[in-house]
Every structure is written in C-alpha cells, then in structure tokens.
Image (cartoon, rainbow, N blue to C red):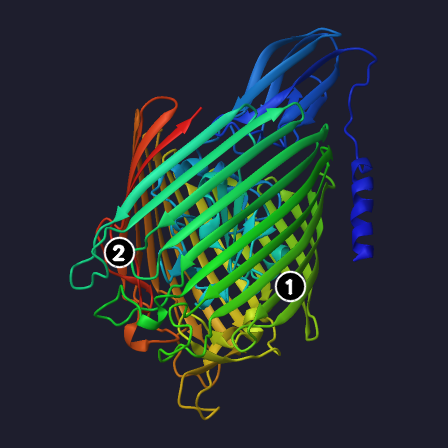
Amino acid sequence: MRTYLSFILLLIYLVPSFSQDLQVTAESGGTITGMVYDQQTQSPLSLVDVYLDSIFIGAITGRDGRFILRYIPDGTYTLVVERLGYKPYREENVRVVSGRLISRKIGLQPTEISGEEVLVTAARKEQTAQMAPASVVILRATDLESRPIHTFDQVVEAIPGVSIFRSAGTSVQSLSIRGSSDVAGGGVGNRVLLLVDGRPALTSDAGGAYWSLIPTNFIERVEVVKGAFSSLYGSTAMGGVINVITRRPSYQSLTHISMKYGFYEKAPPDIRYTEKLPLQRQIEASYSGANGRLSYLFNLSNKQSDGHAENTAYNFWDIFTKIMYDLQSNRNLEVTIGGGIAKNDFPHSWLNSAQPLRVRRKYTDDRQEKRQFNFDIHYWAVPSTRSKYSSRFYYYKNAARSYFNENDPNLELPGNEPLGSKTIIDGQKFGNITQVDWLLNSRNYLISGMDIQIDHVNSSPDSVVYGNQQINNLAFYLQDELTLSPSLVATLGIRYDSNHLVGGKTLQQLSPKVAMVYRPRKNIAFRLLYGQAFRAPTIAERFFKRELSGGVLFKPNPDLDAEKMDYSLESGVRWQLNQFVNVDLALFRYHYKDLIYWVDIAKEEQVNFPYFQVRNLNRALMQGAELSLQFSWKQFIRASANYTYLDARDLSPNREDDLLAYRPEHSFFFHVFFNWRRLHLNLDGRYRSKIKEVFLYPLQKPEAFWVLNGKVRYQLNTNFELSVSAQNILNTQYEELARYRMPGRNWMFGISANF
C-alpha cells in the first residue's frame, strides 16, 4: 500500500511537467478570460477548446469551465469555442488591446444529432457515440425529465436491451444486459457494473447495486455501454457498464424544488390485500451556486410509498453534496459526499397464485433498514493539450439490518425458527482509480491507470450470512487508440487483475480487447469488438447459507473460481439515414467458461428439501441481435424503438436442458416524445417474452407482458411546471420474478420550481 500511494504522489508531481503548450510569450499583450457552460443545464463544461483562429493562442477549460488566454498581441480576432457534442461558438471582431482584460461567459448548445453525443464510459475518454466501439445508450437529464420516472430502477428499465427483475416496486434483485446476469437475492450474480462518476457503486457483500437509491434529479446523464468491458473496468463488467454522471454545480445560483404525490389504484376485489388507497410521495430539493474559485451543489430527496402489495412499503432519504475548487488554471479538486437511509418492508413471495398481493403470515412483520455513506475526492488536471491526469479516492460504508419475527419473539409460528430475529451486514469499500492520458502524436492516444479496491464485510449470524470476510483487488490497465487513417480507428487494450480473498484463494486474470471503427462517411460507422472478461466471485456467493426472502438453504463454496468470458464478439453499424432517422444494428456472441450458477444438490447430498450450491459451470453461450431506430423532427417529436433477440444456452455437461434461467428471448422497447410550446407529452412501452426457465417455482414462470407508461408536463412559466405521470397504463397484472406481482396502474401528480 505504501508503494502504491508513493507512486500516486509521484504522478501528481510529475504529470504537470510532461508537456507544455507552445504559446506567445511577449512581455505585454491583452488577455481573454471567461467560463464555458451548458446552456440547458447551466453546468460548467470541461475539456472545451478555446482559441483565436488566426494565431497560435488557445486553452482548454478545467472542470469549472474556466479558461484564460494571455499575451495576445493587439489586433482584431475571431474567438472560437468547440467541444464534442456541442454546436461550435464563433465570435468575430474581438478587439484586443494590451493591458486590457476581456471577459466572456459562453453557453454552448448540445447537438441534436444522437451520433454526435459525447460519452466517456466506452473508452475512459471523451468520444462521440458514432465512434464508440460498442453499442451505447445515452440518457440526458432532459430525457429523464420527460419520462414518468420517480426512482432510478425506472431509469434503467427504460434502457433498450436491459432486463430488470424486481421483487417489489423498487427492490431490484437483478439487472441484466443481453442476458448477462443471473437472478438472485440482493444482486448476487450481478454482471453489470454500476458506476457513479466513474467509481464502482456496488455493495461489498453481494456485488449488487442500490439501483433505487440514486436521486434522479442529481443525474446529469446516464451512459450505458453493452458488452464485455473488463479490459477497462475489471470484474463485474462482463455484460456491460452503466455510468451515472452526476450534476456539477451551476455557474450561478440555482434552486430546484420538486414535489410529487400519487396513489396506486386499488387492485381487483378478488386479489385486493387492503381497502385503503396506497399512497406514494416524493420531494426533492437542490441548491447550486459559486463563490470565486469555489462552487457547490446540495441535494436532498425523500421518497415514500405505502406499497402496491403487502410488505412492499418503503421510505428513502438521500443527501448528496458536491464541492468543486479551482486550484489553478486547468487543475481542479472535486469532493462528493453522500448518504442515505432506506427503510422498507422485507419483500417476500406471494401467498399463492389466487392471492398474489399477500404474503405468508410469518413474513408480515419482516423489514429492512439500510444506511449508506460515501465519500469521493477527485483531483483532475489538464497541464497541456497532450496530457491529462486524474486520481479519485472513494469510500463507501453500508450498514444493512434485516429484522424478522418482531411479532413472534418466541418463534412460535412454523417456519420462523431458521432466520431468528435479525441479520447484520456491515460493509466497507475503499478504492482508488488513477489514470494518465497521453496524446503521444496524431495517431496514438494512450491511457494507463491503476485501480485498487478493498471490500470488507462483517456480518452475523454465521448460520445465515457470511461472517467476517475481506477481498482485495489490485489492477493495472493500458489502452492505445490508434488513428490508422481519417476513417479508421483501432483500439487495443489490456488489464491485469489480482483478486485475493483474505485467508483464501488468489485469482489472477488478464482481460484483453481489440476494437475497430471504420467511418467511410460522416453519416455511417461500422464497428467490430473482440474482448475477454471475467468476474471474481463475491463474498455472498462464496459464503451465504440461506436465501432470506424464501429461506432456501445453500451450501457455502469458498473455493469458487472466477468465471470467464472466453470471447465477446460484437459487430455493428450506426447509420444516420437523413436528418431525421438514425439506425443502429448489432450482432453479438458471448461465450462463458466456469459460469457461476446455482446448482440443485439435494440428490447428491441425499436430502429431501431444496438445497443449492453456487458452482462453476463449464460453458454457456449467449448470442443474438439488437436493432435500434431513432427519429426526430425539429424540436417537436422524438421517437425511438429497440428490439433485442437473445439465445441463451447452457453448454455444460450433465445438464437437464439447454436453457439458461431468466433470459427472455424477445424484448422490445419504444419511446415517443411530443413537444408543442408549453406542453410536453411522453409515452414509453416495453415488452418482454415469457421466461422459459427459472431456478425455483417452475410452475409459476413469469409470462410475457406489455407495460405502457406516460407523462404530461405543462410549463406554466419559466419557473414553474406541472406534471401528471401514469405507470402501467394498461393495468397489466404481471411478474418479473416468479411469485412477485408487480404494481398495477398508479398515478403521480407533481409540481416543480426553479429560481
């Protein structure tokens, strides 16, 4: 650890001197200074090129969006401001006089062409979506505002190619991209990496994510990259990466308040669990501003729900603070502090198919409490146009308590004995990601970095959960983006991971990647991606003994190996047919080895009750195709549609059939947004085909379903807006997981203010 920290400090000292821009160094001259910001979000923009087009004087904005051009000879110039994903800004006839300071605040307008949108997740550097080597989806804050979204799990359910499995309205058991993840309690078996501002946001025990607890109004955009990305992000990124980019402080004081109130419609009388009208409430407030070199953003939110079914009520509180300080030109320090308290009923499977909204009597007093704290400090520097440096330290602390049998302290009800009265899981995650970017020449853009992560879990009782365990992971990665010609770009990358279970096995893995993007014309780009990936088993998979929501027994397996993806292949094309229509077609094929999977061992253990163990299977194959269409007409209409076909096969020996569990063969999603003056209308729809294979409850496999959601917004004036949202407009009765009925039609009425 001491050697690692010393190396980071050495990089901080050396990187600013790696290369310097050529510049005019006259003793006198004029100066242009200012800040560049996003016109829509009012947030500062970093990495913006600011220059005078007739002489070699320019600068790049820092995280706070500020720039300064010095030593400008007297004269009249054109000021140019350019950034990927934004319309260029040009100001002609800027008169510069020695000794005078010219100040500008420049707002850039995001481009309306989806292929020119900018993302950072696919290559750990900024690039347009058109040049990304994999299938990508970008959801901006304006997209989220237009959709009927109240919690973050509703954000990810609207992402094409994503399958989400919930045991209640917000209790996400699994999230899968193109069939990547298995379905297990608490996110066990998760193969989709959740990042918040580039740092892992996963629980220390199960490797799952608190998908529902990210405040939606704190999001600037969501970037989704599909396919194997262990070459950059290591374990868990086998199926893809979801990176939540949070808002930055605005350059001027801005207060936002949003209040929503709604209800679930009563269920049909024959399955109704209560005569009361279940309510849901939400309030979010944020304040942003700046004072000299310091800018800040505070966000507070609360979400409450009585629940659509028995044991589905929740109450979430979240607070986030982001502080940015401009140390000097193009060198910034950013601190993020957040935390939350979640209290909810413990979700359990239904009483029976005739009463899907009720649970067994012994479960009605079960509940959960989760407390989470995170701290992140990020140093970021652009010492020259050819180098960039960043180092991010982060810390998470999670405390989860599950309470059982509070109304039966003597454990008199049948079935209450195994769980006892309480489980305790305390997790801590410490990590650092340090990265250096070098533009070596016009052909080579090199990225190198280190990634360290420590997960420690202390839990009890040992008869149910994991005890005291720790996993240390150290990784190094390297990537070179080669511009072979103006129309052909290749990416070569590799990452080495060493994953050590304290007191147990050490797993080592190399994850390579090769990608090509060929863009013969501006409106079309062909891509090809080959990679290998891995996922180290989590503490939960190695040691958990009982599945809490159903009480299924497990035999621990601390000798689990890492599962590997022998190869990940994707080929595709992005084509802008005209100014209205964009098409994206992808073909994918993923081959797994030693896939971590639940195995029924009741027969081999000679027991007459359900008994499972997490084991490595030999092989599995997931392949398919994905087609996405996007349509836009001026500012009035935006529409998109996506279809995903998935063929998921178990290729291991001694299998009962060829199907992998919880992989829908067909899924479809569409989105339509209409804007007319002050009125905004939105309609979302998603379809998922029948689940053909499950782990448990084979007689209650989830059937196919259609779900439609809608939202209407009306802008009263520049400060106030009214909205009405409807989830599950068709009132479809459906399950994402066997024996867990999802909410029927429900409504939310809102008002928001900005001032």
**Helix, strand or loop status at disc 2:** strand
- Inspect the image, locate mark 1, and give the three-letter code of the amino acid beneath it: His
Residue drawn at (31%, 41%) of the image: 261
Residue at the outermost left position: 269
Count of numbered badges drawn on the protein: 2
Number of the front mark, 2 or 1:
1
Quadrant for the N terminus, please.
bottom right
- The residues bearing labels 2 and 1 have C-alpha atoms spaced at a distance of 41 Å
- Inspect the image, locate mark 2, and give the three-letter code of the amino acid beneath it: Trp
Q: Is residue 748 left or right of residue 199?
A: left
Q: Quick check: can you spot residue 400?
A: yes
Q: Which mark is residue 456?
A: 1
Q: Which mark is residue 212?
A: none
Q: Is residue 722 left or right of residue 33?
A: left
Residue at the outermost front position: 410
Choose top left, top right, bottom left or bottom right for residue 567: bottom right
Quadrant for the C terminus, please.
top left
Q: Residue 297: horizontal and vertical position, in percent?
A: 56, 33
Q: Quick check: can you spot residue 174?
A: no
Against 724, residue 291 (above or below) is above
Q: Residues within 10 Å of mark 2 (few under 14, many from 20)?
A: some
- Taking depth in this image into account, of 361 and 585 the one nearest to the observer is 361
Q: Residue 411: horizontal and vertical position, in percent?
A: 41, 77
Q: Which mark is residue 706?
A: 2
Against 619, residue 629 (above or below) is above
Against 15, residue 169 (above or below) is below
Q: Residue 450: horizontal and vertical position, in percent?
A: 71, 53
Q: Earlier in the sequence, mark 2 or mark 1?
A: 1
Residue drawn at (59%, 32%) of the image: 296
Q: Is residue 640 left or right of residue 450?
A: left
